[in-house]
């Protein structure tokens, strides 16, 4: 077991270097109110109910060197599960490569919390080749909070139902995200947006495939505001419907608002 040590004026901390965490039943790393750093760390082939590889509750995990989270399985969050705690402490993950994990909800990452903005923040994270029933790359629990991120790559993930790359059931703010090569057998190859709002700037959604809404599917409650959005080479497979290969939305959804003329659809 890792014993955090206190630092003045901050949370308990753990520094990991040259560590492989593997084949544990109950998850690889659990952090509750901690600040972790990682250098040359691999978290692989672990299993858990929440966060097969890593579970963060009001904690931060920052990669100062290589950090790979791979081959883990869970019910929610095959690679990583994150939440805020007590309405105060946001969890943060930065610099990680999350690859080939599996879960029922959120093959790569699952987010939940207490209804506030930023239950999990992602920075400079790669989410690649993960698989789930819903939310192949990222899953956010319906009606629970939000997550934000900058410079995140979500690619080549697969969902058996909705949200090949990202399934957002509440709020999402995405800056400089690349969502590419994902597939959903249901709706939203790149993104499935079901929350009350979603937004971002510099979002690229390319080469995703779904039965409906190859790039983006907006559910009934969804309100989406994006700036500098690029949608290219997305496709849909259900030729019996009128839903689009790029954007699709259900009746009652406010669909898509592009600010400052910054949206490009190819």
Image (cartoon, rainbow, N blue to C red):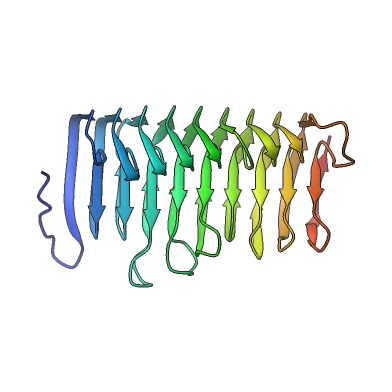
Residue 121: quarter of image: bottom left
> Does residue 94 appear anywhere in the picture?
no
Give the farthest residue toward the bottom: 87
- How many marks are shown on the rendered structure? 0
Give whichever of 154, 109 is nearer the camera. Answer: 109
Residue at image coords 34%, 45%: 49
Left or right for 233, reference 182 = right
Compared with 68, 170 (above or below) is below
Query: The C terminus appears in which quarter of the rendering?
Result: top right
Residue at image coords 38%, 39%: 74
Give whichever of 213, 5 is nearer the camera. Answer: 213
Residue 26: percent from the left, percent from the top? 24, 41
Residue at image coords 58%, 27%: 156
> Does residue 220 appear anywhere in the picture?
yes
Give whichever of 100, 265 is nearer the camera. Answer: 100
Left or right for 262, reference 94 = right
Left or right for 112, reference 20 = right
Residue 221: percent from the left, percent from the top? 71, 63
Compared with 99, 173 (above or below) is below
Residue 239: percent from the left, percent from the top? 87, 31
Query: The N terminus appears in which quarter of the rendering?
Result: top left
Left or right for 168, reference 206 = left
Residue 85: percent from the left, percent from the top? 33, 66
Give whichever of 116, 230 is nearer the camera. Answer: 116
Residue at image coords 24%, 60%: 33
């Amino acid at each position: 077991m890792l014993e955090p040590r206190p630092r003045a004026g901050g949370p308990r901390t753990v520094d990991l270097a040259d560590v492989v965490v593997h084949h544990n039943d109950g998850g690889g790393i659990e952090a509750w109110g901690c600040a972790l750093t990682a250098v040359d760390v691999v978290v692989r082939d672990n299993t858990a109910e929440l966060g097969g590889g890593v579970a963060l509750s009001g904690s931060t995990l920052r990669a100062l060197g290589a950090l790979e989270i791979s081959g883990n399985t869970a019910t929610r969050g095959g690679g990583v599960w994150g939440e805020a705690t007590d309405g105060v402490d946001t969890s943060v993950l930065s610099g990680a490569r999350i690859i080939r994990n599996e879960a029922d909800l959120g093959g790569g990452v699952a987010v939940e919390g207490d209804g506030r903005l930023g239950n999990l923040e992602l920075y400079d994270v790669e989410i690649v080749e993960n698989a789930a029933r819903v939310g192949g790359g990222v899953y956010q629990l319906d009606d629970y909070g939000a997550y934000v991120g900058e410079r995140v790559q979500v690619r080549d993930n697969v969902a058996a139902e909705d949200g090949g790359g990202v399934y957002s059931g509440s709020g999402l703010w995405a800056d400089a995200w690349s969502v590419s090569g994902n597939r959903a057998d249901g709706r939203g190859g790149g993104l499935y947006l079901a929350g009350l709002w979603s937004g971002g700037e510099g979002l690229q959604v390319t080469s995703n495939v779904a039965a409906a809404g190859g790039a983006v599917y907006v559910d009934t409650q969804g309100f989406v505001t994006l700036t500098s959005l690029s949608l290219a080479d997305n496709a849909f497979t259900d030729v019996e419907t009128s839903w689009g290969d790029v954007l699709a939305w259900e009746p009652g959804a406010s669909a898509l608002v592009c600010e400052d003329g910054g949206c490009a659809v190819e």
